[in-house]
């Protein structure tokens, strides 16, 4: 066992909160009058969401392109309301993170556009309260996980070295990306298993 991490870096959706993609789709379907399939294609099938997450387009460009794809103006408030409907905080995981915060620094790195982190207080109040300003969107770093620069530029901002960081995500690909970038990685599968992992690192 190496020394306890200086930083535990959490993914948000799938770890700190549940992500209900269907609820997001249903909300935008009601706003636009388009079918759920049309909404899914506009966001994901077209590649628009991936470009936004990677910081290839601005938030305004993202909303403009989404409006064009759906044939209906999608205002910022519409988008935020749909995202809010999709997020349910995992209170048990947040409680573990709060305990970890007593031992080391904590932060969030999520594959998202800046709209999510700019409005985190509305979208996910418990995460905003616990992590404060240290909730980072991949778009801010010009690439999405699992690209190495996403993790490393986030760590530069936090002033922490890769080998001092434990990264927690719910996808194999993103955990592997973190490990390839020099971080320690752990795949989240359950609250109990995460608690055991954090104890192993002497963080609980």
Image (spheres, rainbow, N blue to C red):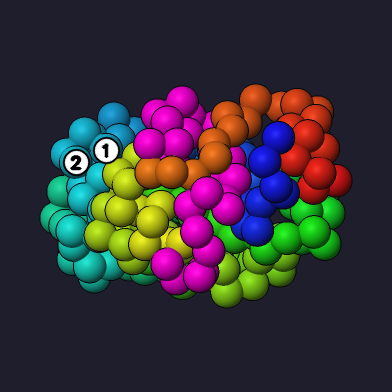
Contact (Cβ within 8 Å) of mark 1 with mark 2 = yes
Residue 101 position by quadrant: bottom right
Find residue 170 and report its horizontal and vertical position in percent.
Answer: 54, 32
Image vertical order of residue 147 relative to residue 153, above or below: above
The residue tagged 2 is 47
What quarter of the picture does the N terminus occupy?
A: top right
Viewer-closest of 142 and 198: 198
The residue tagged 1 is 44
Relative side of 62 to 31, left or right: left
Is residue 179 located in the magenta-colored stretch of the structure?
yes
- Tag 2 secondary structure: loop
| Classed neighbour count for the residue bearing mark 2: other residues with Cα under 10 Å, few (<14), some (14–19), many (≥20) | few
**Magenta-highlighted residues:** 156-180
Which residue shows up at 59% across the image and 33% down it?
186
- Tag 1 secondary structure: helix
Relative side of 94 to 141, left or right: right
| Prevailing SS of the magenta stretch | helix
């Amino acid at each position: 066992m190496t020394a306890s991490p200086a930083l535990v870096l959490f993914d948000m959706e799938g770890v700190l909160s549940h992500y209900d993609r269907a609820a997001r789709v249903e909300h935008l379907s009601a706003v636009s009058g388009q079918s759920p399939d049309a909404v899914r294609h506009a966001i994901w099938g077209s590649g628009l969401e991936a470009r936004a997450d990677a910081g290839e387009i601005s938030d305004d460009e993202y909303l403009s392109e989404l409006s064009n794809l759906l044939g209906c103006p999608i205002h910022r408030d519409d988008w935020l309301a749909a995202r809010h409907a999709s997020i349910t905080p995992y209170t048990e995981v947040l409680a573990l993170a709060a305990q970890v915060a007593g031992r080391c620094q904590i932060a969030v790195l999520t594959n998202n556009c800046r709209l999510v982190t700019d409005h985190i207080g509305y979208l996910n109040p418990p995460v905003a309260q616990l992590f404060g300003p240290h909730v980072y969107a991949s778009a801010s770093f010009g690439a999405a996980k699992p690209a190495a620069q996403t993790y490393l530029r986030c760590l530069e901002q936090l002033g922490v070295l890769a080998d001092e960081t434990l990264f927690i995500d719910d996808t194999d690909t993103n955990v592997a990306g973190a490990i390839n970038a020099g971080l320690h990685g752990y795949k989240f599968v359950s609250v109990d298993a995460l608690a055991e992992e954090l104890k192993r690192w002497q963080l609980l």
